[in-house]
Amino acid sequence: MIARSQPENEPADWQHAQRDAFTRPTDLLAMLGLPAAAVGLSDAAAAAFAFRVPRPWAARIRRGDPDDPLLRQVLPVAPEGRARAGFVTDPVGDRAAERAPGLLYKYRGRALLLVTGACAIHCRYCFRREFPYGESVGHARLDAALALLAAAPDVDEVILSGGDPLSLRDERLAELVTRLAAIPHLRRLRVHTRVPVTIPTRVTPALVDWLCGTRLSSVMVLHTNHAQEIDDEVAAALAPLRAAGVPLLNQAVLLKGINDDAQTLRELSTRLFEAGVLPYYLHLLDRVRGTTHFAVPLRRARQLGRELRDTLPGYLVPKLVREQAGRPSKTPLVP
Ligand code: SF4
């Protein structure tokens, strides 16, 4: 197990890492030995969507490489200011799907619970980068969401999302899971998170306890876009979850200049599998404002999807999909 036992009132390793993140791009660039002008850093972009990169993840960025695929996921650049038709503030219809503050019904049988607006890392392509979390999340609002869930017998799976649910302390998450488990028709608990990849020490014994100590069947869906994100520390951090029998899946976003070639995607699938994680989804970019420079054309995405299908065993091929507001499921892009 990665985490050490914690004296009372002392923040855990992961909480320290969360607070100690880079919040100024120039500090990260200084560590990487890169001048701001060489990477196209934009102060205006950084002001529009705050910069945040935890140090364990930053340590996997190659020094001196302005095109590093991890750096490009988090670096605020001028093209974020470009407007383009179809790139909007809420590309997947989150607000229209909200039935109570923070409770979203999109697909039959499943409900998405936004438990926090906080994330350990700020990904420039995030489809919720403009989501008004202040109107939807918070402890006080949870009662209404849980009451609505309790009155929805057709829902048997709850997905904890955000923000990143693992930004919250284990005590709060354990309490929430206890309340969810008390709703008789719920059967599965899914956690969508990027934190075990960005701050591996977040996988604490207490996390494994609440995730596995519930009557609900638990599954964790990680978010990783490039094999370089999964170092030995991440793989070791995931081991207790695997040992406890938690299915680990990954969803990635297809991002121009970061993972839009078949070899990079093959390497991602292979590395995930070595770390005990199955590739689940490869998402076409959700067209949120400020992300036009990440968009991969549909034709190219389909070609990549076919190349993966033709060169990898089926269990390593993520489903290439697009999320479209109001649809009853994600739309598959390679038949
Ligand atoms: S971790 Fe997820 S929710 Fe948070 S900024 Fe990145 S993509 Fe968005």
Image (tube, rainbow, N blue to C red):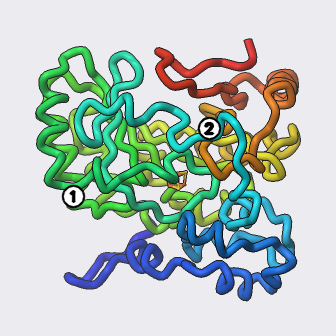
> If the image is split into quadrants, where does the N terminus sit?
bottom left
Tell me which residue sits at (82%, 33%) in the image.
Answer: 297
Nearest the eye: 130 or 3: 130
Report crowding for label 1: few under 14, some 14 to 19, many 20 or more residues within 10 A (C-alpha): few
The image position of residue 7, as x and y in percent, is 24, 83
Report crowding for label 2: few under 14, some 14 to 19, many 20 or more residues within 10 A (C-alpha): many
> Real-space Cα distance between discs 1 and 2?
30 Å
Tell me which residue sits at (86%, 30%) in the image.
Answer: 300
Disc nearest the viewer among 1 and 2: 2
The quadrant where residue 276 appears: top right
Q: Is mark 2 within 8 Å of ligand 1?
A: no
Nearest the eye: 53 or 57: 53
Above or below: residue 48 compared with residue 159:
below
Q: Which residue is mark 2?
A: 286
Q: N-terminal of the two: label 1 or label 2?
A: 1
* Residue extending farthest top: 335
> At label 1, which amino acid type do we have?
Arg
The quadrant where residue 286 appears: top right
Above or below: residue 48 compared with residue 286:
below
> If the image is split into quadrants, where does the C terminus sit?
top right
Label 1 close to label 2 by CB (< 8 Å): no
Q: Which residue is mark 1?
A: 172
Per the rendering, the mark at residue 282 is none
Above or below: residue 108 compared with residue 234:
above
Asked if one can make out residue 218 in the rendered structure from this viewpoint, the answer is no
Compared across the picture, whether 201 is left or right of 34 comes to: left
At mark 1, the secondary structure is helix
Compared across the picture, whether 237 is left or right of 296 comes to: left
